[in-house]
Image (cartoon, rainbow, N blue to C red):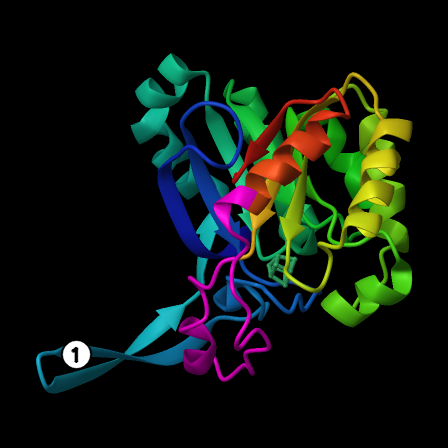
Amino acid sequence: MKGLFFSVKRYSIHDGQGIRVTFFMKGCPLRCRWCHNPEGISPLPESVVQTNRIGTHKFSHVEEVGRYYSIDYILEILNKEKVFMNHSKGGVTFSGGEPMLQAEFLLEALKVCKEKGYHTAVDTSGYSSVENFKSIIPFTDLFLFDIKHLDDVKHIELTGASNKDILNNYLLLTNCEKDLYVRIPIIPGMNDDIDYLERLRNFLISTKTDSLKRINLLPFHKIGSSKYKKFNIPYNMEGKEPPGKVKMQELKEFFMETGIPVKIGG
Ligand code: SF4
């Protein structure tokens, strides 16, 4: 059994506790307007033209995006980083794209990683069936779970998909006795007005359980914008600027009223 991945990040400190290895799985059913990983959207391997400049010279080559990894190969990578992970109480994170799109492979990978004693995390948009989530809960120590918008109509407008299953899965995970970090992208003009954020804060308070360990506020950034052209995907965020430091600090204090630790960034 193999899974399709578009990237692996060693020494990751933004995808859960400690030092981690993050595996980015290819394929996502959502189309978030601000997505900074367009290479993670297609569920198939892709060939793209990469152009680099040195001075006035341009050099182009074809780059293959997407590789199939076996679970043994994943273990090989983890084994090399074991010392750092153990010392820092880190582990392995499966991210994307949307890792739940390859639910069968993800389940097997998590099972084996747990058997080998690794702390396991899944970074998800929450968009999958409740059965898929139930199947991975026993083998997942930490869920990193995005809430992009609470209103279904707005969620469809911003991501192309309904949030009904997402919110149901969120409630499931608040009650499964596993750690949960909720991740809130802050996207200017799309989900950052104060009335909406107040509703979101109330939602987090009213659904809070001991599982909810952290709120991550993820400010919109433009780092992925140059990748869109390469993948022939229209970029929808032209002219949008990232929220400033002062605004993010104000939002941090605003969400701290939930009683849950808040961090700006991953
Ligand atoms: S869920 Fe994540 S990977 Fe998928 S489109 Fe949205 S931001 Fe991109």
Q: Tell me which segment is drawn in magenta.
A: 221-246
The image shows residue 6 at horizontal and vertical percentages of 45, 59
In screen coordinates, is 128 left or right of 17? right
**Residue found at x 42% / y 32%:** 13
Main SS type for the magenta part?
loop
Give the image quarter of residue 81.
Answer: top left
Q: Amino acid at mark 1?
A: Arg
The image shows residue 158 at horizontal and vertical percentages of 74, 67
Give the residue number, with chain letter if any, for mark 1.
53
Check mark 1 vs ligand 1: CB closer than 8 Å? yes or no: no
Residue closer to the observer: 177 or 71: 177
The image shows residue 92 at horizontal and vertical percentages of 49, 32
In screen coordinates, is 111 left or right of 211? left
In screen coordinates, is 3 left or right of 150? left
Answer whether residue 103 is visible to the viewer in this image.
Answer: yes
Q: Residues within 10 Å of mark 1 (few under 14, many from 20)?
A: few
In the rendered image, residue 82 lying in the magenta stretch gets the answer no
